[in-house]
Image (spheres, rainbow, N blue to C red):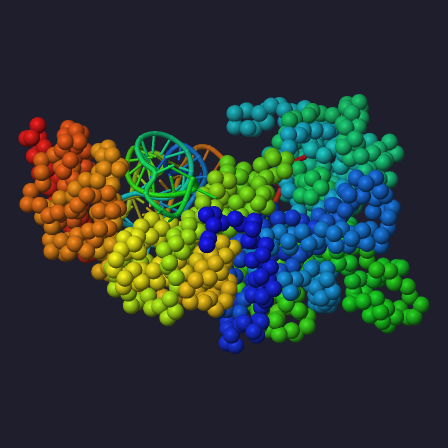
Amino acid sequence: MLEKNFIPQDVEERLYNEWERSGAFKAGDPARVEAGAQPYCIVIPPPNVTGSLHMGHALNNTLQDVLIRFERMRGKDVLWQVGTDHAGIATQMVVERQLAQEGNAGRREMGREAFLERVWAWKAESGGTIAAQLRRLGASCDWSRERFTMDEGLSAAVLKVFVQLHKEGLIYKDKRLVNWDPTLGTAISDLEVEPKEVQGSLWHFRYPLEDGVTFQFPIEHDEEGHPTAFETRNYIVVATTRPETMLGDTAVAVNAKDPRYKDLIGKHVVLPLVGRLIPIVGDDHADPEQGSGAVKITPAHDFNDFEVGRRHDLPKINILDAQARLNDEVPEAYRGLDRFVARKKIVEDLDAIKLLDKIDDHTLMVPYGDRSNDVIEPWLTDQWYVDAATLAKPAIEAVEKGDTVFVPKNWEKTYFEWMRNIQPWCISRQLWWGHQIPAWYTPDGDVFVAHNEDEAYVQARRKHGSDIVLTRDEDVLDTWFSSALWPFSTLGWPEKTPELARYYKTDVLSTAHDIIFFWVARMMMMGLHFMDEVPFHTVYIHALVRDEKGAKMSKSKGNVINPLDLIDTYGADALRFTMAALAAQGRDVKIAEARVEGYRNFGTKLWNAARFCEMNECARVDGFDPSSVKQTLNRWIVGEVETSAAKITQELEAYRFNEAAGVVYRFIWNIFCDWYVELAKPLLQGDDEAAKAETRAMAAWVLDQAILLLHPFMPFITEELWQRTGEAGSPRTGALILAEWPHLSGMVDEEAAAEMDWVIRLISDVRSVRAEMNVPAGAKIPLRVKGAGASTLARLERHNDLVCRMARLSDVAVAEALPTGSLQFVLDEATMGLPIADVIDLRAEMARLEKAMAKLEGDIKKILGKLGNEKFIANAPEDVIEEQKERQASAEAELAKLGDAHAKLKSAL
RNA sequence: GGGCGGUUAGCUCAGCUGGGAGAGCAUCUCGUUUACACCGAGAGGGUCGGCGGUUCGAUCCCGUCACCGCCCACCA
């Protein structure tokens, strides 16, 4: 016996373990997968190894699992390749924070080896968390193939890729400006910089011109902007938002087209506080509209200035150390100062010597590190770069050709935009946790890239002789470097494994749009370069999960919903269904707990429908042929199952998860529970043994189909029902997870559908009229039918018991005329009357009829407007015109009947 | 500055090929009829952001404006 409610906590863990133990998740299991089965593969976006499940994971992994379970049931050889990412910066930061909290020595004091030991220990301790949480969600990944970006195999892949790209000239070392994070002490990529709007100041400084030089600066203008008055200046004003960088200035740039300054080009200024003589250069970078029109140039600390410096061959003076303190390149008074302390002091000092011209309020965008939240400094260092522009070309073409498509398609534009303007990818990080760069240096800086130290020595000796000593590059690679290889490295590359041959290219990659640049683009580049084939044919971009008001979830806002709490309260199925139901393409997902509760209720609804079947002995019958049934009700429901199943299949194939979820929801609740079960009751409780047996078998069959169709969305409750309902009737052949997805055809019976549609409309109309006219719900009242045609009479006869029961009627009879004071409504050609004149208020009934008539009149007017339009008749397709004519006819017929009823009432008063 | 998306019921959102505006929640009324009160029956509620265009016909296509959100670039 089924209990009254499904208790997720009692079954989820047990069922998951059963699935996993049975090998249901295992790809290519010969015991299970048929020989010719088509492969289907999704690689999971690897979560951070020490992370825990958040809403984004819940959404993305639900959608992936829906696809995986769907395709598995369709008989494909499914591989959901699972694993975790070492997440260089994030993980290292966590461990460093732990060390600090424990009052232990920092990583530098510990040394590299001891620190890495500590990180591995943390990985061992917390690395299983996310996997356990994915299991709680019901994710049917192949855990036997779980990988980690720093495991042996994947590290070998990273090595090979680095060495090969270097050999091909696609990885190189360069000294240029990078985004430097002073807190983390590492370079980061452009993508890891978040510009934020800040209310700051624009400081205007006077840079004195070299000895004796002066110029005429316009101070008044006429209406057309021509200067009318000048003053003589022996200085030039520059404006800056970062005063401290002035200590590294090596030029002042003005625009050669700017009449105010053009004559100064080639002259020099004396850099205040420093005393360095620096040139005034003409460069288009100087915008006459911005600031003072003259711009200080600091090539070592500003990306634009770096380019200006390159054009004019200016020296690059680095004035900051790795912690963004001023270094020994600056006058003694400023050495060792933090950049922001120095900023204040420089402004004060310039003010003191009367070189501070003015300070304006200024809104500007300041770059922050996405991890450290510290202000990023452009800093001149040696780093390793990937020639992304070269690798991007085939990756762009692949999407242009459609080898890989984005769903929704509009994200392709974002992808193209970025890829066509791609910058060199800085891949070295001054961290310890990650793949150490396989490069070895001689004491004089010669570099050898090799798979290992021995190989590096072989190369070095060949060039330098035998007494050379090599030291390894201390830096590690950007985490995304190893992630970029994920679709083939997890399948065994660089080994030629059978899995690689079978599952690459993979099928679908599911991720959020903010990962397109970080990961998708880079997988495309690496996949095409090393496998000569795209890594996946489809990129599904899911929405971002927000709170119910649409705000981004963040710890600081306190609006974070923990998916595990929702699983605890409502069960994994409810959370999963919510995720799928909200996953409309191209929208953010706003999650409200009420939604999850509603879908928990949906599960309970199905559970109770199963209980109903159980109580009514609706057991599965071996060899039952759903297309052979006789009862109209049963012939109808079979067609409904077919239609819904086809729709769900079609929507899932198109990645419209919300539509698929909506169809299965409506099928189970509105069709199966609300109507089929209710309409089946008279048959199940009646005396016609044949009809009873047929209906029992059919109810059991429909329930099975519902369970099958719902399984990808709600795996636990459906599996539990599958097994529990297997206790009666013909035996199950296996677990639901491996059962066959419904594929039905030829079972739609138009005649039965029309008839049941009529029954449902009749019952609904009676209920509606009763409720509207306040007929007591318990009262059984008669129904009289006027003007019914032959088929209606037959239907009334066939469904008499049913209609009486569901509409709470005492009896149904044909009448020549409807008694005065009947509540009346029209169903197709017939007029229906509920004669209860003694109970009802005749005026209220008249008002009700008037309202219905007014609506019909409005409809008719609208239709006549269309049909009376010659152009409509000339241009609209035939079927549209036909439809309008039919609507007109039926509305007019109904209006006439209601008008008749209304007139009789009126005369009776 | 460039680009993308949004504006539909009180709230959150569907509406995929242009042809009678939908769901869930909330609200109101009625109801415990042995599957289910995590329920059932019924009802109210929308100028589909504004303006213009294309079309016989526009929530849907085009243009434009307003407001909201996001991305990229840049801001001395």
Seen at 79% across and 39% down, the residue is A101
- Please say whether residue A549 is visible from this viewpoint: yes
**Residue lying furthest right in this view?**
A467
Q: Is residue A391 left or right of residue A375?
A: left
Above or below, A90 against A336 in this view is below
- Please say whether residue A513 is visible from this viewpoint: no
* Front-lying residue, A770 or A109: A770
- The mark tally for this picture is 0
**Residue lying furthest front in this view?**
A687
Q: Is residue A756 left or right of residue A704?
A: left
Q: Position of residue A104 (x, y in %)?
A: 84, 42
Q: Is residue A836 left or right of residue A248?
A: left
Seen at 48% across and 69% down, the residue is A733
Seen at 80% across and 51% down, the residue is A118
The image quadrant where one finds the C terminus of chain A is top left
Q: Quadrant of residue A694?
A: bottom left
Seen at 65% across and 26% down, the residue is A360
Q: Quadrant of residue A846?
A: top left
Q: Is residue A100 left or right of residue A658?
A: right
* Front-lying residue, B72 or A544: A544
Q: Position of residue A399 (x, y in %)?
A: 52, 61
